[in-house]
Image (cartoon, helix red, strand yellow):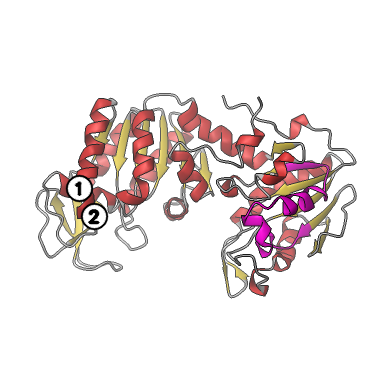
Amino acid sequence: MVNFKTLDDFDLNGRRALVRVDLNVPMNKRKITDQTRAERIIPTIKEILEKGAGVILASHLGRPSGKVVPDYSLEQLIPLLKILMPNRNITFSPDGNKEPGPGEIILLENLRFNPGEENNDQDFSKFLSGLADVYINDAFSCSHRAHASTEGITHLLPSAAGRLMETELQALDLALGNPIHPVVAVVGGNKISTKLGVLENLLKKVDHLIVGGAMANTFLYALGNPVGRSICEENMANVALDVIENAKLLDCEIHLPSDVILAEKLEDNPKTILAKKDSVPSDLMILDIGPDTVSSIITLLNNSKTLLWNGPLGAFEFKPFDNATNCVAQAAANLTTKRQLATIAGGGDTMAALKNAQVSDSFSYISSAGGAFLEWLEGKKLPGVIPLLND
């Protein structure tokens, strides 16, 4: 198991804890459209407060690129935090000149208003470290970047993982670090080019690799199948063949669609056609995998112990092209409920797809991280995580 420092390693009574969290919640016209990220940080904050510490929350919002942009001010998140943590003393401190007493919470202004944050500037790291006695990283989703608040500060303060980070690292270890075999990975998305590193790393780690989404079209094309007007990276065909050959060498079985759902347009409820993978007409698009492929995947899951999922199997945003993703996700959730399968998923589209399938509460763990989750899938060492590991 991954061995890292946690809240259990610190005596927090009477101390000031700077907690790096991810409050980069989606917003539309200054209204929060999904508060999941904010909800996930609450257990760590409450535990630190209950241990007698004062909390300084540090986060970014949006991409202000080192400039003050009022629409990205964290002050607008104070009402949400007060709803999530009623009867708590929560104060906004744009310049960091307020000090929290035991049981109190200070929210700093958007870290990325200061160019020193993304530049991992030593002076900004020193400023942040001067606000606290200990540093807690509870933002795995931001830990793939060597920023002042994720990497620089760890050289200046005793550092540990918050409970959300701890849960995330344990789940990732369960999926790839120390999994129970057989291990199945589902990888979807549009392009091989954006997930080549993920594919190459997973071939070394999993027993079965299911390729879905538009990415599967490129594999089918590379193997000589017609793909009509489907999204397809024809220039990546040789790369797809290399992946298939490498899988054989590494004893990893790749699973591609045997049948597909077709339509003329990507829209809700168009006329659809079911076809075998080698019978796609030139004027249609592949928009989902077919029932035979779905059945094969579910059979595979029934005979597996661990599932790692990143990316939908079809164009799930449009009905009925969410059918395959929904069916497979619901089968996986059912096996998880029966404790027959450990299920770990991550990525923005994946979260949305699993929410659409109504299984968000049934998987073993769903990561809210995007880029950090992908870089972890690629086998990269994350600069915000390395300082938290025990020697």
Q: In the figure, residue 16 lies in which quadrant?
A: top right
Q: CA distance from mark 2 to mark 1?
A: 7 Å
* Mark 2 secondary-structure assignment: loop
Q: Residue type at mark 1: give it.
A: Ala
Nearest the viewer among 315 and 100 is 100
Highlighted range, magenta: 107-136
Nearest the viewer among 336 and 370 is 370
Q: In the picture provided, is 328 more to the left or to the right than 350?
A: left
Residue 50 is one of the magenta-drawn residues = no
Q: Is residue 313 visible?
A: no
Q: Residue at x 86, y 60 (%)?
A: 97
> 92 above or below 341?
below
Instruction: Kindly identify which residue carries mark 2.
Output: 233
Instruction: Kindly identify which residue carries mark 1.
Output: 237
Question: Alpha-carbon neighbours of circle 1 within 10 Å: few (<14), some, or many (≥20)?
Answer: many
The answer to whether mark 2 and mark 1 are in CB contact below 8 A is yes
Q: In the picture provided, is 30 more to the left or to the right than 367?
A: right
